[in-house]
Image (cartoon, rainbow, N blue to C red):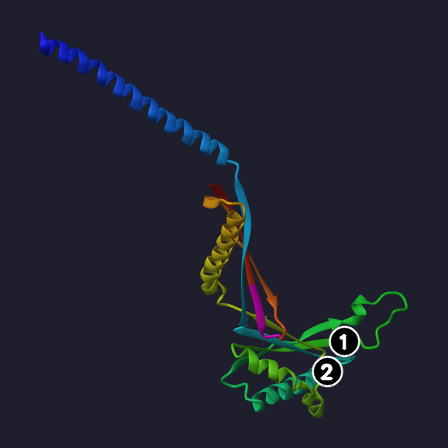
Amino acid sequence: MEEKKEKRIIGPALVAAAIAFGMLALGLCIKGGIDNFANKDRKVKVKGLAERQVDADKVTWTMNLQESGDELKPIFASLNTKVASLQAFLKEKGVEGKATVSASSANVDDNMANAWGNNRPLFRYSVNRSVTVTSKDTKFIDELMSKTDELLDRNVILSSSYANYEYTKFQELKPDMMAEAISNAEKTAKQFAENSHSKINKIVEAGQGEFSIEDGDVPYKKNIRVVSTITYSLKD
């Protein structure tokens, strides 16, 4: 009889304990759900910036020459002489070994073909040739471009002269700059969270980052920047 009575007492006790535990677990789940519901719309969107100034590592310098006249033979002879003088000038300035120099073939325009009415051209033909210098030594070419006034002593007048500077190692720089931009964005988010008595939780949304390459203060300098936009969720 005593054993049966003990079993009756233990049975209800276990049931009561199980119910109490279940209610506790349910309460914790409900609290977690309420907290998640309360925090689900708490977000902060921040921007992270990374900047670099680098030297361009490639330059393409194009110089154009033009001759006009009514007879093609003397025009070609004069233009070819000037191209040769320009190439000699570049060689004397030490371009060999630092750059590649190439000259284009002649491009002939018949001005009479484009004339109409009484707008007759002064000369029938205009002939153009260009000399292009390609180099990785961008500083050297930049300095050399400032010396082209010396060509006047050789009776060489450039119809135009322009250089295109490039930074070809951009892909190598990209991962480090992205990491820096993301790190700066996280610092901004943490500061915002601290000011609002919260903590950052996890990244909700992240942009790939917008890169831009602009000319610097001097022609062979390039300013590279990336801005990453990241949204973090917040928690108490």
Segment tinted magenta in the rendering: 219-224
State the residue at coordinates (14%, 13%).
6
Q: Residue furthest right?
A: 118
State the residue at coordinates (61%, 84%).
144
Disc 1 element: strand
State the residue at coordinates (47%, 46%).
200
Q: Is residue 27 magenta?
A: no
Q: Is residue 223 magenta?
A: yes
* Residue 125 numbered mark, or none: 1
Residue 123 sits in which quadrant?
bottom right
Q: Position of residue 212 (x, y in %)?
A: 58, 60
Q: CA distance from mark 2 to mark 1?
A: 9 Å
Alpha-carbon neighbours of circle 2 within 10 Å: few (<14), some, or many (≥20)?
A: some
Most foreground residue, 120 or 89: 89
Alpha-carbon neighbours of circle 1 within 10 Å: few (<14), some, or many (≥20)?
A: some
Most foreground residue, 81 or 55: 55
Disc 2 element: helix
Circle 2/circle 1 CB separation < 8 Å: yes
State the residue at coordinates (29%, 19%).
19
* Residue 75 numbered mark, or none: 2
